[in-house]
Amino acid sequence: MAEALVEKRATRRFALQLPIAVEPGNGSALRHYHTRDVSAGGISFYSEAPMPKYSEIHFLMTLPPEITQTEGIDIRCHGRVVRVERDDTGLCIAAAIERYEYLGGS
């Protein structure tokens, strides 16, 4: 008998392809990517290079009005890589957001 998949996420995901600027916690150069999806607790984005699981990352992005229900809001996030996987589009990095700060409207 096939086992049903159980959704473990506590917050709603938005399938949004947003530009983000990612800086690995090891001090590597800032790189620009696009998200696969975004939630209040994390993001997943496409990368051409893997990142070590549990490694620290910092990223900047603008949350669009579809999410904020007002204007676009720039945020800086600090997080940790929780999953690295391949899908039909390429290498996907999932990161949990540990803290964030609002930088203001865009």
Image (tube, rainbow, N blue to C red):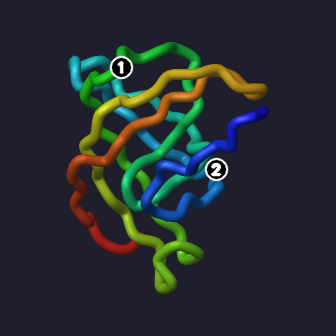
Dot 2 or dot 1: first in sequence order is 2
Q: Is residue 35 above or below residue 102?
A: above
* Residue corresponding to mark 2: 17
Q: Residue at x 70, y 26 (%)?
A: 87
Q: Quadrant of residue 103?
A: bottom left
Separation (CA) of disc 2 from disc 1: 22 Å
Graded by Cα atoms within 10 Å as few (under 14), some (14 to 19) or many (20 or more), the crowding at tag 2 reads: some
Q: Which mark is residue 13?
A: none
Mark 2 vs 1: CB contact within 8 A? no
Q: Is residue 61 above or below residue 4?
A: below
Image coordinates of residue 24 in percent, x first then y, are 31, 25
Q: Is residue 90 left or right of residue 56?
A: right
Of marks 2 and 1, the one in the foreground: 1
Image coordinates of residue 20 in percent, x first then y, are 47, 44
* Residue corresponding to mark 1: 53
Image coordinates of residue 16 in percent, x first then y, are 63, 55
